[in-house]
Image (tube, helix red, strand yellow):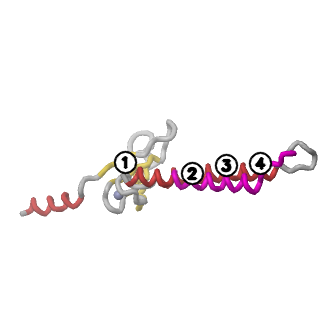
Amino acid sequence: MKYWGLLLAKIVAIAGFAWGTNWLIHEFYRVPVETLLPGSKPETHFFATMLWAHAIAGLCWAAMVDQRYRCRTCATRLRMPVATGSWGRATLFGRPKMEYICPYGHGTMNISQLQLTGRETPEWDRHGDMWKELESIGSSRD
Ligand SMILES: [Zn+2]
């Protein structure tokens, strides 16, 4: 739930920023009514709008990349990247992957480094409760 809430918060923040900056551009760089007259400079409005569109697209991209590397349970940034597999055996078994883990133990994410058939969706493996697992190890010895 936190994962989707964070994504929604990012979308709302970017939309608010986009609306505010668009309002500022139209307030301070208005397109002159006499645009077609010689000597007018509508380029400033055009370039400001183009820069605005690129900035918004960049913010959306950064939000998506940031969201990709977050835990699906607690929305914490995934940490401790570990390279698994090898490039020498990439065609058969042991394809190279980068594995990230939630610092609170909610799960791991495997991102394939070899993507032959286009962009692959990262695999998210949800972990069980690690404390119960540790307690079960201790209780089985008794
Ligand atoms: Zn987590």
Q: Where is residue 27 in the image (x, y as percent from the top left)?
A: 73, 55
Location of residue 123 (image quadrant): top left
Q: Of the residues tagged 1 and 2, which is closer to the observer?
A: 2
Q: Give the spatial CA distance, label 1 vs label 2.
A: 29 Å
Q: Tag on residue 46? A: 4
Image location of residue 32, percent across then percent down: 83, 48
Q: Kindly identify the amino acid type of the residue bearing the numbered disc 4.
A: Phe
Which quadrant of the figure shows ligand 1?
bottom left
Q: On the rendered structure, is 62 left or right of 22?
A: left
Q: Is residue 85 visible?
A: no
Q: Mark 1 points at which residue?
A: 124
- Check the image and name the residue furthest to the right: 38
Question: Does the magenta portion include 28?
Answer: yes
Q: How far apart are marks 1 and 4 (CA)?
A: 43 Å
CB at disc 3 and ligand 1 closer than 8 Å: no
Which residue is under mark 3? 53
Name which residue type carries label 1: Trp
Please report the residue visible at 13 percent of the width from the left and 63 percent of the height from the top. 138
In percent of width and height, residue 72 lies at 37, 52
Label 2: which secondary element: helix
Q: Which of marks 4 and 2 is nearer the N terminus?
A: 2
Q: Give the range drawn in magenta.
A: 11-34
Q: Is mark 4 on a helix, strand or loop?
A: helix
Q: Is residue 5 magenta?
A: no
Distance of label 4 from label 3 (alpha carbons): 11 Å
Circle 2 is placed at which residue position?
A: 15
Which residue: 71% across, 54% down?
Answer: 25
Residue 90 visible here: yes
* Neighbourhood count class around disc 4 (C-alpha, 10 Å): few under 14, some 14–19, many 20 upward: some
Are circles 3 and 1 on residues that touch, CB within 8 Å?
no
| Circle 1 Cα neighbour tier, 10 Å, few/some/many (<14 / 14–19 / ≥20) | some
